[in-house]
Amino acid sequence: MFELSVVELSRWQFAITALYHYLFVPLTLGLSLMIAAMETVYVTTGKQIYRDITRFWTKLFLINFALGVATGLTMEFQFGTNWSFYSSFVGDIFGAPLAIEGLMAFFLEATFIGMMVFGWDRMSRGQHLAVTYMVALGSNLSALWILVANSFMQMPEGAFFNPVTMRMELASFGELIFSANAQAKFVHTSIAGYVTGAIFVAGISAWYMLKRRHMELARRSFRMAALFGVLSTAGVITLGDALGFVGGQAQPAKLAAMEGLWQSEPAPMPFNLVGFPSQKDQTNYGEVQIPYALSLLVTHSLDGTVPGFDELEKRATQRIRNGIPAVQALQTLSRNPGDATALEQFRAHESDLGYGFLVHRYAEDVGAATDAQISQAASDTIPHVATIFWSFRLMVAMGLGMLAFFVLAVIYSLRNDVQHQRWFLRVAVWMIPVPFLANEFGWLVAELGRQPWTVYEVLPTWMSASTHSVGYMVFSLAGFVALYTAFIVAEMYLMVRAIRIGPAAPDDGGDGSGAAADDRHLDGQAAGYAGA
């Protein structure tokens, strides 16, 4: 049996590297599409200013893309090093979308980025615009395949467990791709990236207007970001509700943690606006509730109910008891694959095999598991409620705040006086980190809410890790933290440097009409990033 500390250190390492990496992903998604939109305006109007706008934001996109690739590649190595049993158990399913992401989406994006940067004077306007859209398409396809893989972990569909090979095997590639969770998560995550890109562009444009530099470029960029952002924010909030509905049906424990539901209640159920969940006491302190709101938000009716942890723990206990014969049959089949009686017993209980694995953590002989051990395994199905509860609320609060910001941004921009609203420009600058934090909180809700499962109701996290030593994991974790911190520092330095230099050469007098004089600087940086 694995040491808990090794599993926890493996979880910490993957969580930290994923959170670092996820700082780059949303901005890549958002900027790629915004740059395509900016270049579309240039091609349709022929105005030089939009060419300059496109080239400037492309420079920042390149910095972010290079660091995103570096952090993503090293993160994926952990599936083989720290989660070897997981890789063996579900590699036939999980590996397929990851391979497609690398072969189709990533190579597509990387190839066309070079053409986008160096092809301005080598292609027609229409051809270059098509290349820019291919970069945006590659970014979004990359996100699609990664989220298909992640959605299998959240809602395993299109696969089955083979007791002969002792592995999960792919049954339907279509079900894997078109699962409700995968599609909802892809749209929600992609649009969240568009919001991030819009806030980023608006904030930097506001900084230029505060400094009275590059005013024409800043005003036009800000207007595009405002229009892009208000539509994207409305979409991400709406589709977030849809994702919550799908996720709530598939993972009721995650939904109960998001809402702080320790006890089941009759309809209509109140919504816990504020509260301080106690895992030990299984209650919330200092609750502030909105009557009827939870039933309306989650079930879209006043008659709907959501099970609390008291009911979910009872369900888990029963499924653990039903899963124990499946584990016993699997042990027999591992010794004698032709045992028909064991195979029949496995087929009768295979839907609860994962729950049988949960108690195996506490009882080497699952058939002799005590009531206390079964109860302990059932309590593991309750994730860390306080973290999920508050991460969800902070994410929603930030989403509503960004919507309010973009509504004001559109109003001021269309009135053509945003440059005179200096208080609002300062707010815009301070808004830059908000979507990044909202994305991180969303990731915490999605991944912590799935615990104690690596693959929901199929493979427990405690079984998934490699058999490393604690010393190795501490050394590895420290190394990754140092490496990824260096990546963040490099990103911030390069971004700030590029923003301070601006879209025009330093001696252009600060009127900011164009970026054409900075072309050689951009091309030199692009070559370096492509090499990275």
Image (cartoon, helix red, strand yellow):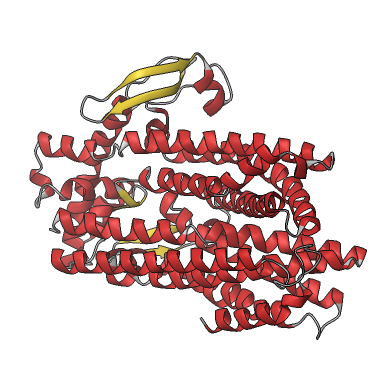
Residue 326 drawn at (x, y percent): 23, 50
Q: Name which residue lies at 22% across and 36% down.
A: 379
- Given residues 428 and 300, the one toward you in this image is 428
Left or right of 320 in this view: 132: right
Q: Is residue 164 visible?
A: no
Residue 174, image quadrant? bottom right
Left or right of 144 in this view: 86: left
- Given residues 15 and 522, the one toward you in this image is 522
Left or right of 82 in this view: 177: right
Q: Is residue 345 above or below residue 300?
A: below
Residue 324 drawn at (x, y percent): 19, 46
Quadrant of the drawing holding the N terminus? bottom left
Q: Is residue 425 above or below residue 327?
A: above
Q: Is residue 351 visible?
A: yes
- Given residues 181 and 196, the one toward you in this image is 196
Q: Name which residue lies at 75% across and 75% down.
A: 131
Residue 81, image quadrant? bottom left
- The number of numbered badges drawn on the structure is 0
- Given residues 378 and 272, the one toward you in this image is 272
Q: Is residue 18 above or below residue 396?
A: below
Q: Name which residue lies at 33% across and 26% down.
A: 276
Residue 179 drawn at (x, y percent): 54, 51
Q: Residue furthest right?
A: 45
Residue 35 drawn at (x, y percent): 72, 63
